[in-house]
Each structure stands twice: as C-alpha cells, then as structure tokens.
Image (cartoon, rainbow, N blue to C red):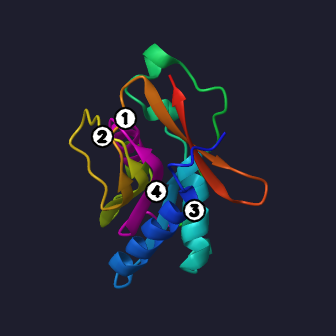
Amino acid sequence: MPNPDFDAEALYRTMSESVKAGLEQAENLAIVGIYSGGAWLAERLAAEMNLGARLGFIDVSFYRDDYAAKGLHAEVKPTHIPFEVEGATILLVDDVLYTGRTTRAAINELFDYGRPAKIMLAALVDRGGRELPIAADFVAQTFPLPADQQLVLGRADDGRLSLTVDHA
C-alpha cells in the first residue's frame, strides 16, 4: 500500500521542474533511466522534454560490485542505449539514491558505450546512507531512512507513481 507521507506524483513534478530548468541550455542531451523505477521516471522526463529518440535504459546487474555476493536479480532487463554516448550530456535517472553503488555501476556501464562529455544524476528521493562519494544534481526530496527499511517506487497501470516504505 502506498505511503501517504510520500506523494510520488508531487515528488516527480518537483524533480521534473528542477531537471528542466537545470538542463535547458545543455547540448547533446540524452536521458538514461536505471531499471526499473529510474526507467519509469526517465520515460516521463524524455516525453516532457521531447527527447524520445535520446532515451536509453540501463540494467546494472552485471556491473554491481556486490554481484558475487547478491547474485543475479530475477528480472534482468537488457540495457538499451540507442544513441551515441560519446560526447553526450547524459542525465542518469534513478528512483532512490542510497549507497551510491547503483550509480557507480551505471556510470561504469555507460563508459562501455563511449565517453560522455558529462553525466548528471537525478533522483526522486535521496535516503542518505552513502557508501561512495556520489551526490544527485537534481533530487526532489531528501528523506533519511534506517538501514532496515527501503523505499520502493511503484507504477500503476495508468502510469501513476507511488512510494512505499518496506522493511528489508
């Protein structure tokens, strides 16, 4: 059940406005969403910014530094980057920023496709708990959570977003 403390749609609007204002002068812009929640957010942003042809998706499963310990996620999706990464300004989009390890893995994978001019990060929520020196350029809300809880972004059939707090 969605948590009433988190209005995911309002958080998305906040993030979207910040991204659009911050990137209005960006050249050679492309958007890459990290599966799955980041991909949903990236789809919306790309549609609003008329960047549908410059939209990609990334699955970091094979690039995580804890792959050996955690194993392969049950729903691995193919990475799809249909544009030239070399020299592009990439907006990397994720739903929840936590340790920074997913972001690091996504950056490593992006570099397998070429060397971007710049990579910026947008996240719906920053929950704190960083283990790597990574920060979002655009974030709708910072909301620290204990390590035994996690934020989960959901998407209904009509596309509406919801956030739930689950116990790990």
Question: Type of residue at label 4?
Answer: Val
Q: Nearer the viewer, mark 4 or mark 3?
A: 3
Which amino acid lies under the numbered mark 1 shown in the image of this protein?
Leu
Extreme residue toward the left, this view: 133
The N terminus appears in which quarter of the rendering? top right
Q: Which residue is mark 1?
A: 145
Q: Point out the tag, 1 or 4, that comes first from the N-terminus.
A: 4
Q: CA distance from mark 4 to mark 3?
A: 16 Å
Query: Which residue is most to the right?
Result: 157
For label 3, the residue is 9
The residue that mark 4 highlights is: 93
Mark toward the viewer: 2 or 1: 1
* Residue 91 in view: yes
What's drawn in magenta, residue-wise? 84-107
What is the three-letter code of the residue carrying label 3?
Answer: Glu
What's the distance in space between the residues labelled 2 and 4, CA to CA? 17 Å
Q: SS class of the residue under badge 2?
A: loop
Cα distance in 3D space between marks 1 and 4 = 20 Å
